[in-house]
Image (cartoon, helix red, strand yellow):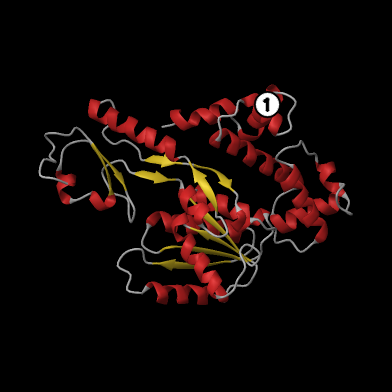
Amino acid sequence: MGNEFTSKNISGIIASEYKFTDRIKEMTIPKIAAPYKEIIGGIPNIVTDDAAIGQMGAKYFLSKGFDNFAFYGYEDSFWSKARQYSFQNEINQARLNCLTKNKTQFKSKDSSQKHLKNLAKWLSGLKKPVAIMLCSDDLSFEIMEAARLINARIPYEIAILGVDNDDLICDLCSPSLSSIEHDSYTVGFNTAKMLDQMIKGEHSKNPNNIIGQPHHIVERLSTEVLAIKDPNLLKALVFINETGPSQILTVDCVVNVTCLSRRQLERKFLSTISSGIAKEIHRVKVNHIKYLLFSTNLTFKEIALETGFKNSDNFSRYFKHICKLSPRDYRRIRVSRL
C-alpha cells in the first residue's frame, strides 16, 4: 500500500486477513474482511458454510460405498477445521471411522521433501481403498505426489475430493481432481453489494457475515470409482450413476438389473451407503441438474430434454419437489441471495 492510501481518499475496503493491518483496523470507513486463520471480530467476514461442505463430501463418499475415510487439511485455519469436524461427524453417524492429518500452513519448519515423506508414510498406513477429502484444492498436488511415492493408484486405492473447484488446479492434477463447487460469484456480488450499502449508511451497524454455500460436486477422474464389494449392489449403483443423469429411473428399473428382490436390494442400499434406492436415484439426478443450472447457460427446456423429462414443466415440478425451490429460483440465487 502506498503513502496515498488513507481514509480520506477511499470510502470502504475489502481486505484479506493478511492485509488487515492495525492501520486498516483503526480506519473509520466501512470494512469487510476475508479471513484465513480466524474470524476478525466487529466487522462482516466473507466465509463459507464449512459444515455443509464437510457434510456434502462425506455423503458423496458414503454413496460410493467406501468403508475407509480420511481428511487432510490445515491445522491453523478455522474453515479447514470446521470442514474436518463436519466430515468426521457425518462419517461417524454412519458408524464408520475417519482418520485425519493436518499440516501447518504458516511458519512450517519442515522441508517440502520431508513433509512429502511424512505424508506418504501416513497414506501407506491407511486401509485401502480409502476416500480422502481435502480441505481445499490447494493440497491436491502434494497428496497425489505422496500417493505416487508409495505406488498407490488413484482412484482405485485412494479416491480424492477437493473443495473450490479451481479449474486450473483440478485439470492440472493427474488424474484430474473432483471438487466441491461453491458459489463464489454470488459471494463476490453480495460482498460488493453489502459494502455499497455500508458506505451509503443503508446497512445495520452490525451486518451479518457473507456466507457462501456449496452447490454440487464436479466429478473428475480422482473419484471415478465405486468401492462396492457386493456384485448386485455394484450393478445397481453403476446403473444409477451412468443412466440416472439422462433418463427417468424408477426403483423397479434399478432392481431389474440385479438378481435380488426389491426388499433385498433396498436393505443392501441402506446398510452399505446409508441411503434408499429412490433417494440415491434422486441424488444423482439432482446433482446433475444443479451442475447444468449452475455451470451452463442451457435453457430449462434444454436441461429438461438432457435429463430425460418430456418438457420443462415436468422438469420444474420434479426439481421443486426435491429441492423446495424452482429451477429459476435456484439459478437466480447466483445474483440475488444475501
Which of the pair 247/256 is nearer the observer? 247
Q: Position of residue 256 (x, y in %)?
A: 87, 47
User: Residue 187 occupies which quadrant of the picture?
Assistant: top left
Q: How many neighbours does mark 1 have within 10 angstroms: few (below 14), some (14-19), or many (20 or more)? A: some
Which of the pair 115/38 is nearer the observer? 115
Picture layout, residue 162 above or below residue 214: below
Q: Secondary structure at mark 1?
A: helix
The kind of residue tagged 1 is Arg
Say if residue 192 shows up in the picture: yes
Residue hosting label 1: 317
Q: Position of residue 234 (x, y in %)?
A: 77, 57
Which of the pair 222/122 is nearer the observer? 222
Say if residue 136 shows up in the picture: no
Which residue shows up at 51% across the image and 53% down it? 170
Which residue shows up at 63% across the image and 36% down it? 289
Which residue shows up at 23% across the image and 50% down it? 19
Q: Position of residue 75 (x, y in %)?
A: 39, 64
Picture layout, residue 63 above or below residue 299: below
Picture layout, residue 335 above or below residue 253: above
